[in-house]
Amino acid sequence: MEKVIKRFSMLVLLAFLIGVFLNGTEYYFNKKEIKLLTSGCYEAGGTPMLETSFLLQGYSFWCDVEN
């Protein structure tokens, strides 16, 4: 019985670590994408408009360019 509990605990820990890793990579790539979008907007002569949700899990972006 102790062996089953130990294996289950290891499985839960592994699932948690995988979740943390996936969350971290999503955060990293969202941050890179936002940086690229904002620099492109500035190069086009616009003002970047950005709305982010909790921990950058989602965002809305648009470039306000005045003619």
Image (cartoon, rainbow, N blue to C red):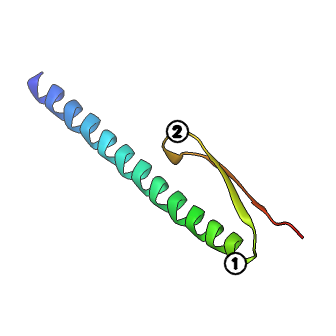
Q: Residue at x 52, y 38 (%)?
A: 54
Q: CA distance from mark 2 to mark 1?
A: 28 Å
Q: Position of residue 59 (x, y in %)?
A: 63, 48
Determine the residue located farthest toward the top in the rendered image.
1
Position of the C terminus, as image quadrant, is bottom right
Q: Is residue 12 left or right of residue 63?
A: left
Q: Position of residue 56 (x, y in %)?
A: 53, 47
Q: Residue at x 43, y 48 (%)?
A: 23
Give the image quarter of residue 1: top left
Residue assigned mark 2? 54
| Secondary structure under the numbered disc 1 in the rendered image | helix
Please rate how many residues cluster around mark 2, counting C-alpha atoms within 10 Å: few if below 14, some from 14 to 19, many from 20.
Answer: few
Q: Nearer the viewer, residue 28 or 14?
A: 28
Under mark 1, the amino acid is Glu
Give the image quarter of residue 3: top left
Please rate how many residues cluster around mark 1, counting C-alpha atoms within 10 Å: few if below 14, some from 14 to 19, many from 20.
Answer: few
Q: Which mark is residue 43?
A: 1
Q: Residue at x 47, y 53 (%)?
A: 27
Q: Residue at x 63, y 66 (%)?
A: 38
